Amino acid sequence: DYMRLKEKITGDLKTAMLARDAFTTNVLRGLKAAILDEEVSLNKRDEGLSDTEIEKILAREVKKRNEAAKLLDEARAEIEIKEAVVIQKYLPEMASEEDIRAAVKTKMSELNADIKQMGAVIGAVKSKFGTSADGAVIAKIVKEELNK
């Protein structure tokens, strides 16, 4: 199960290089560097990271680009967004707000949650969705539901 995602990125990088697709080549090189950095910092250079660990890195890279896009002028923001789109292809399909809201409601009724359990609800829903749901979106929905 290990290394599948990393191998896919490596394969796609070779394809992009052969196709002289400079944009994709640069994005994937950056991803490989981010993965390598994490492997080194976690002392997992030899065995490598699991797909789940790599997905967390990819989600972080997408989030970085989306946040940068909000701060930049239109032309540079467009590049950040295009990069995020390339990276997003390696992540599981993002959960819809309806799916997240349904999970939040279920968890709230399980816990009979009030505002004090907000963190517990967010944590539970986050672990259910993994990288397929943005923590900020989960938190926003939990706040909305708790304030009803």
Image: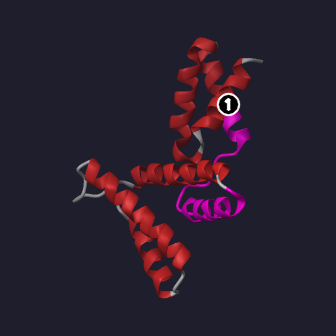
Which residue is at the front of the view, 59 or 37?
Answer: 37
Could one spot residue 1 in this view of the protein?
Answer: no
Rendered position, 39 above or below 116: below
Q: Is residue 75 left or right of residue 117?
A: right
Find residue 121 and report its horizontal and vertical position in percent: 58, 24
The residue under label 1 is which amino acid type? Lys
Rendered position, 76 above or below 128: below
Which residue is at the front of the view, 28 or 101?
Answer: 28
Determine the secondary structure under disc 1.
helix
> Where does label 1 land, which residue?
140
Magenta stretch encompasses residue 111: no
The residue depicted at 69 percent of the width and 30 percent of the height is 141
The residue depicted at 69 percent of the width and 26 percent of the height is 105
Could one spot residue 32 in this view of the protein?
Answer: yes
Q: Which residues are magenta?
A: 73-101
Q: Which quadrant holds the N terminus?
A: bottom left
The residue depicted at 50 percent of the width and 53 percent of the height is 61
Find residue 90 and report its horizontal and vertical position in percent: 53, 62
Find residue 88 and report its horizontal and vertical position in percent: 58, 59
